[in-house]
Amino acid sequence: MTVELFVLRHGETTWNREGRMQGHLNAPLTELGVAQAVAQRNIMTGQDLSGFRVLSSPSGRAVETAAIALGPLVTEITTDPDLREVGVGEWTGRLRAELIDPTEWQVTTDGVLELYDMAPGGETLAGLEARCSQFLARLEGPHVLVTHGITSRMIRALALGHGPNVTLEALAEMPGGQGVVYHVKKGRQKRLC
């Protein structure tokens, strides 16, 4: 894949702070989440966005982050349902601590990735990979994407050539975190500060 990307993860939400599984539901940004979006705007202000299209997940937390981080810098932000977070089925809204003992699993900045395959009625990581692969295949030209933790990891893994069949190890090796910006170009990614 040769399309240049800036990938932003939304800022912290109340559910993130509480350790809840969000999936397709929404929770509002915290004060820290708003500050993270402002920090993303400061990072993106230094980028030449000429020719870039801006796409955001339709989830409120991503739309709010996009408005804060990119609204002053671009003329149009479009939502795309393929950028929503991986679905967590019956575990939506549940506390991660109720579901597993985190000491038994590898914990990333975006939680225990195996949970997304274990969620009853959830999308699964294979389902997310299929959705993100189709999404990336239809992109033409450079894009700024505002998305979520697990979806960001999957998009970046695929853009860097880890597919098909992205492994948990490849996802876990992807750096994550809230309110961050990654630049993906020519098979390389860089976290912008």
Image (cartoon, grey):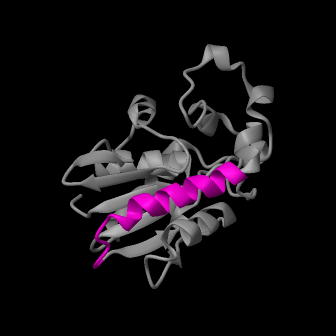
- Residue 92 falls left or right of residue 52: right
Identify the residue at horizontal 63%, vertical 67% (top origin): 64
In the rendered image, the vertical position of residue 172 relative to residue 150, given as above or below: above
Identify the residue at horizontal 64%, vertical 58% (top origin): 34
- Give the magenta-colored segment's residue range: 31-51
- Residue 179 falls left or right of residue 46: right
Is residue 21 shown to the viewer in this render?
no
Q: Quadrant of the N terminus?
A: bottom left
Identify the residue at horizontal 53%, vertical 51% (top origin): 179
In the rendered image, the vertical position of residue 70 relative to residue 39, given as above or below: below
Residue positioned most to the bottom: 75
Residue 103 located within the stretch drawn in magenta? no
Q: Nearer the viewer, residue 94 or 71?
A: 71
- Residue 11 falls left or right of residue 22: left
Identify the residue at horizontal 47%, vertical 50% (top origin): 152
Residue 30 screen position, x and y as percent: 72, 52
Q: How many tags in the picture?
A: 0
| Rendering quarter of residue 165 | top left
Q: Nearer the viewer, residue 153 or 124?
A: 153
Residue 101 screen position, x and y as percent: 72, 18
Is residue 166 shown to the viewer in this render?
yes
Residue 147 screen position, x and y as percent: 52, 58
Residue 124 screen position, x and y as percent: 58, 44
* Secondary structure predominantly adopted by residues drawn in magenta: helix
Q: Nearer the viewer, residue 164 or 157?
A: 157
- Residue 87 falls left or right of residue 113: right
In the rendered image, the vertical position of residue 37 relative to residue 70, given as above or below: above
Residue 36 located within the stretch drawn in magenta? yes
| Rendering quarter of residue 118 | top right
| Rendering quarter of residue 144 | bottom left
